Amino acid sequence: MIKIMNWFSMVIGLIPLNRQEVGSNVIVDYAMMFIVPIIYVACYLTINWMHAFGVCLLDSCNSVCKLSNNLFMHLGAFLYLTITLMSLYRRKDFFLQFDERLNAIDEVIQKCRRVAEMDKVKVTAVKHSVAYHFTWLFLFCVFSFALYYDVRALYMTFGHFAFIPFMVSSFPYLAGSIIQGEFIYHVSVISQRFEQINALFEKINQEARHRHAPLTVFDIESEGKKERKTITPVTAMDGRTTGTFGNEHKLAGEMKRQLGQQKNDEDDVDSSNDEDEDDFDYDNVTIAENTGTTSEANLPDLFKLHDKILSLSVITNGEFGPQCVPYMAACFVVSIFGIFLETKVNFIVSGKSRLLDYVTYLYVIWSFTTMVVAYIVLRLCCNANNHSKQSAMIVHEIMQKKPAFMLSNDLFYNKMKSFTLQFLHWEGYFQFNGIGLFALDYTFIFSTVSAATSYLIVLLQFDMTAILRNEGLMS
């Protein structure tokens, strides 16, 4: 389904042709992104300036039909031209940058998968796959029905010239929905990467339940140097101090550095040691593992992965977030007038004017279609935010359990504490949004329904009886 949507997006000029190739021909890549908008503008001007092939220009189209059709057509023009101009801005650069960062993230994730996935994780993945494909299949059926209804009605009215009114009626909403489909796909990819690193975090969390801490409990936040039962100081013949290591999991490179800095008088503590430990390089460390299967060595990579995925979310929202604003606005207006026409017009004079019924049902169909797309966008954005928060919750749970690898060396504790604190700043700094006007989460549904209710209270108070009588629709 994703490949079908991408090919269709390229055909109607929403994304470049060779969006993942750096050295491709620019003219070929952006040809359809200029040709299709020109065709749309030509059809729009044909109806509004040449007064030909428009539903509102027919004699059987009454005043209510003309008002509804003009609103639908001009709102579609605003939607299509806005998203087209935004699509021309760094569209190919975004695809190249997204694929490059995603490949780098996948390489690190594969590197961190040194433990086999559990059966429960596999079952969850299967369920997610079924829901994922069912959602795309449902969207495909909804759009197929909407296009079939509009094309069939226009062909019965205009014959072979039905292409012209179709370009200014349903095509803008189709194009806007496909752009949101691209946004849905990229957000779902980000959400899947969060799920993968959460599975690795959870693996560490499960191991922490079975691995016991040392017998002596230390205050890992104090600035004093702690005793370690696993280190036995030994004075060599040359007067240097060495130590023998126990079987517990520890960082070999860090212990060498500590042994080099250890003084003869261990009671005299330098308070700057904790600051030096924060500068420890996790990438070059060699880890001496015990006989058990452990995965806490992945923690530094997982922290970096989480930051990279959040950065990927930022550039994705920067690309598709502005296009959500005109789409949500069009969805709001079409839904309100669809309810108004259905309750105040269609319920009273249904079946007396074919064109009026066509316009009314067109509002209802596209209001439902755009609301479904908008809901899926909000749902996936919420899922991505929740998965990113889940990573911090799992890390905090590991910290509360105080596993042996954290107590034997407080570098892990400092890194985990920094990660949870950094995520608090991220949560206040970034969230999927429409250029800051509204957040793309479930609270947007509540605010939209509240605003729509206020407008509907005003619209439903209009008395349409006199207008319908003047049009000969009521006796």
Image (cartoon, rainbow, N blue to C red):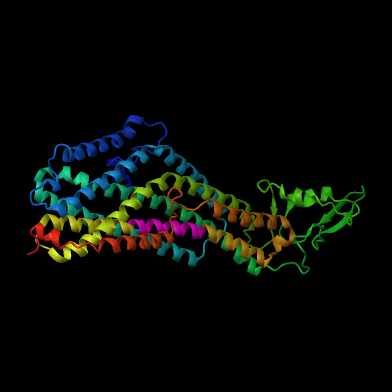
Q: Which residues are magenta?
A: 373-387
Q: Percent position (x, y) of residue 261?
A: 83, 48
Q: Percent position (x, y) of residue 248?
A: 73, 61
Is 181 displayed left or right of 404 in the figure? left
As for residue 381 lying within the magenta part, the answer is yes
Say which residue appears at 83% left-offset and 55% top-offset: 243
**Residue 20 seen from this side:** no
Q: Percent position (x, y) of residue 436?
A: 46, 49
Q: Residue 356, relative to residue 314: is it above or below?
A: below
Q: Between residues 451 and 206, which one lies in front from this camera angle?
A: 451
Say which residue appears at 38% left-offset and 49% top-offset: 325
Q: Percent position (x, y) of residue 336?
A: 28, 58
Say which residue appears at 19% left-offset and 58% top-offset: 361
**Residue 404 seen from this side:** yes
Is 423 displayed left or right of 224 in the figure? left
Image quadrant in which you'd find residue 207: bottom right
